[in-house]
Amino acid sequence: MALKEKIKVIISDLDGTLLNSKHQISDYTKSIFQQLYDQNYLIIIATGRHHLDAFPIIETLGFPVYLVTSNGARIHSPTKELLFSFDISSDAIKSILNMDIDSDITTVLFREAVWQTNKENKKLNSFQKEMHYPPEIVDFKAMEDCGAIKLFFSHDNHQTLVELRDRILVVNPIDFSHAFSLPFCLEFMDKSVDKSVAIFKILEKENFTFEQTISFGDGFNDERMLDATGIGIIMENAVETLKVKLSHLEIISSNDMDGVATYLHEKIVSTFIQK
């Protein structure tokens, strides 16, 4: 069966996948996705970003899509209706924040309207071209309510984050799921939260199955999504350990080479033109 007939749902991560290294969607990618939308393919964007940060990006596509954010903690419909919401409990987060965490590590809580952090991090700030989701520097030790959508840590040394992850899982091994969205970003969500779980909710609502989906990703927060979908595609710029772990999946060209759009044009969109 041709990919055009088999696939009805197209799912993509943002950073390192649909977005180039300037954190933008190229005009070429927009044109390919517009053609897919016009042919009634269901489009789902699934990202680790907060919804306030992601909305302005996906609006540049020029058409409405389903949006999964914070690695599955939020789902918004194409009309921006909130369909699903799940936060980490304050006590669970405090079990981590009360640890002795190296002050060189940037700690971030994703709250509903602001992201709270222990320090300014220009590298993280650069992911937003305009500050739709502003940071607020806080003293976590003085906070009573630490409930949040997501907790994450950033440090330029990946091994530093690996060691922190291992310490956290000793202190609290049961409340969280976790992933490295990028080598310098370690993210913790509630154990029930994952992109694949959120996508299943959308597919169920729209009467599709995973067998009818194709997904694109580059980070370990995409792992279960890539493995669950009918076709999972890994970006060339993905971390090598993900490529090894999912060695059965195809690897395509990088985000800066419009890998997603190029693949979809070759496998699906070009068949529209041939008619």
Image (spheres, rainbow, N blue to C red):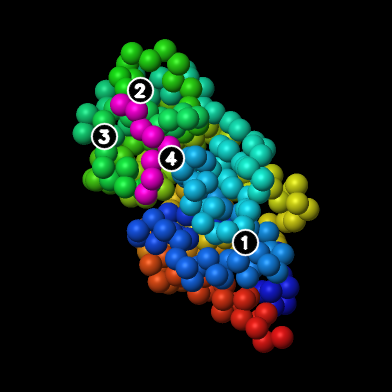
For marks 4 and 3, give the CA distance. 16 Å
Task: Please name the residue that numbered disc 1 is placed on.
Answer: 10
Residue situated in front as seen by the camera: 273 or 152: 273
**Which residue: 56% across, 41% down?**
72
For marks 3 and 2, give the CA distance. 18 Å
Amino acid type, mark 1: Ile
Task: Please name the residue that numbered disc 2 is placed on.
Answer: 97
Residue 105 percent location from the top left of the image: 26, 34
84 sits left or right of 191 in the view: right
Pointer 1: residues within 10 angstroms few (<14), some, or many (20+)?
Answer: many
Task: Please name the residue that numbered disc 4 is placed on.
Answer: 132
Label 4 secondary element: loop
**Which residue: 48% across, 52% down?**
57
Q: Earlier in the sequence, mark 3 or mark 2?
A: 2
Q: Quadrant of residue 109?
A: top left
Assess whether residue 76 is covered by the magenta stretch: no
Task: Please name the residue that numbered disc 3 is placed on.
Answer: 120
